[in-house]
Image (tube, rainbow, N blue to C red):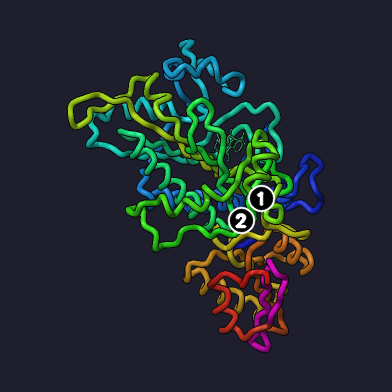
């Protein structure tokens, strides 16, 4: 992408309305603009990041065996009356009346909708297990939308729903999602901690929130320090395996986000030198709710012996748009964003220091074409601007690599490359630089 032809409205000053760093940087780097309270337009740069996150989420959901579909944003109130949630959901639900005076709503979540589809189309245990998901906008009329896209009113969520014939197979579905979540967050460059969460009246151990540690997080975190170090299950673990031992260390290592877990339980479980008490951002939530909606909505299947049983269900959310903010909270410095390679809107920022210089142009065009041909997303700053402004914009938007081309380097056949995360700069012969720019820069020591 040539910056001269792009839409990247960056801001020099910190916007007064933003309280936390991710919100400040998302506005300053031209990722989003507020449309109204808690509702945002995604500008081209932000939209690229949102798509990259969605793609990783999608790949890991598919890999676990979940099937993608797409349900509408607008739902009929009737469905929610069937489940008994229409009145109870309260003011967070945006209620709409159509021209025929039919009550509709903008979906805050999709349990009812998916349960209806499965109820009407799945008759036999032979059609199960099923896990269906979509990546779709939700609306919750949050009382205090804040922190930009982190607590919006309209936000993008991946929500999956599993349907099983028994609690035993539902457990398997739950574990698959657990592993898929660990893998997803790792690929996003995040350390997400699975925290036991309240299951309400259903009880049991089958609800976990996935939390990223951040000072500005809204959730309390109590955990064992070792849990923070656990890597996600690698490719040697297959979804065909029994995943019980794989996720066991995450579940048994103490972690909770519930203020109700009192001090005493935490202290009993974790030795003093291993206690972490911190703040975090909830980026995902997995939940087994058994027959809560299927019973109310009469969703059953026939078992091998001809009985009808009520479906066992779980739901599994990931806050896709919240993740953009959460990743920035986890990865930035005073100069701007530092994108992990996997979600960077552009992996390489190419800076032409003198666009009036033919040699600079030729070298930049060559680098731009060759990296692009290798599948690298390059943002080429070909604007007629001062070098200082180009450097600060590039730092602000946070491409993992920067490549700087000036007349002196061109003469020597050299390129200066900068690792955005460490700030380390190197001047390399063109071909050596090309080799470096196609893979992620080395991490901070
Ligand atoms: P929270 O406790 O933060 O209000 P929740 O428990 O109500 O979230 P879930 O119903 O579990 O949210 O939704 C699944 C995921 O959707 C959450 O883990 C979160 O990442 C994301 N999410 C929920 N509410 C919002 C919001 N208002 N803005 C952005 N993302 C959200
Ligand atoms: Mg939740």
| Residue 2 visible in rendering | yes
- Which quadrant holds residue 298? top left
Residue at the disc numbered 1? 213
Q: Which residue is mark 2?
A: 228
Question: Do residues under tags 1 and 2 come within 8 Å of each other at their CB atoms?
Answer: yes
Residues 91 and 49: in front is: 91
Q: Secondary structure at mark 2?
A: helix
Q: Is residue 220 above or below residue 391?
A: above
Tell me the quarter of the image containing the C terminus.
bottom right
Residue 93 belongs to the span the image colors magenta:
no
**Magenta stretch contains residue 418:** yes
Q: Where is residue 24 shown, x and y percent of the image?
A: 74, 47
Q: Position of residue 324 (x, y in %)?
A: 61, 48
Q: Is residue 192 left or right of residue 112?
A: right
When the figure is inspected, residue 417 is found, relative to residue 316, above or below; the finding is below
Q: Is residue 319 visible?
A: no
Identify the residue at image location x=69%, y=32%. Answer: 145
Q: Quadrant of the N terminus?
A: bottom right
Judged from this view, the residue extending furthest toward the front is 268
């Amino acid at each position: 992408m040539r910056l001269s032809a792009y839409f990247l409205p960056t801001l020099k000053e910190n916007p007064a309305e933003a309280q936390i760093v991710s919100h400040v940087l998302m506005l300053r780097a031209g990722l989003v603009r507020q449309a109204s309270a808690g509702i945002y337009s995604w500008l081209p740069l932000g939209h690229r990041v949102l798509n990259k996150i969605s793609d990783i989420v999608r790949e890991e959901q598919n890999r676990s065996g979940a099937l993608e579909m797409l349900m509408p944003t607008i739902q009929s109130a009737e469905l929610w009356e069937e489940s008994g949630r229409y009145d109870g959901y309260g003011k967070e639900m945006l209620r709409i009346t159509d021209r025929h005076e039919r009550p509709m709503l903008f979906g805050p979540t999709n349990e009812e909708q998916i349960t209806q589809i499965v109820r009407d189309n799945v008759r036999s245990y032979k059609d199960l297990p099923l896990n269906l998901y979509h990546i779709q906008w939700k609306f919750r009329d949050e009382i205090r939308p804040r922190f930009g896209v982190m607590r919006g009113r309209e936000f993008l969520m991946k929500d999956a729903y599993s349907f099983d014939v028994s609690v035993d197979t539902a457990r398997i579905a739950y574990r698959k999602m657990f592993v898929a979540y660990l893998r997803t967050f790792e690929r996003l460059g995040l350390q997400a901690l699975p925290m036991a969460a309240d299951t309400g009246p259903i009880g049991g151990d089958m609800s976990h929130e996935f939390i990223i540690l951040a000072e500005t997080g809204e959730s309390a975190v109590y955990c064992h320090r070792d849990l923070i170090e656990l890597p996600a299950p690698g490719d040697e673990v297959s979804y065909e395996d029994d995943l019980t031992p794989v996720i066991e260390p995450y579940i048994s290592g103490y972690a909770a986000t519930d203020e109700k877990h009192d001090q005493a339980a935490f202290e009993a479980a974790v030795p003093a030198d291993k206690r972490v008490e911190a703040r975090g951002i909830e980026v995902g939530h997995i939940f087994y709710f058994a027959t809560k909606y299927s019973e109310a909505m009469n969703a059953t299947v026939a078992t091998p012996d001809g009985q009808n049983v009520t479906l066992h269900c779980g739901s599994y959310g990931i806050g896709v748009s919240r993740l953009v903010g959460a990743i920035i909270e986890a990865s930035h410095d005073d100069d701007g964003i530092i994108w992990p390679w996997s979600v960077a809107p552009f992996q390489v920022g190419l800076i032409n220091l003198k666009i009036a210089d033919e040699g600079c142009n030729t070298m930049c065009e060559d680098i731009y074409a060759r990296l692009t041909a290798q599948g690298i997303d390059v943002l080429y700053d070909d604007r007629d601007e001062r070098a200082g402004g180009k450097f600060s914009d590039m730092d602000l938007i946070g491409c993992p690599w920067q490549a700087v081309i000036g007349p002196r380097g061109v003469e020597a056949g050299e390129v200066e490359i900068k690792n955005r995360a460490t700030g380390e700069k190197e001047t390399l012969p063109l071909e050596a630089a090309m080799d470096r720019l196609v893979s992620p820069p080395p991490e901070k020591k």
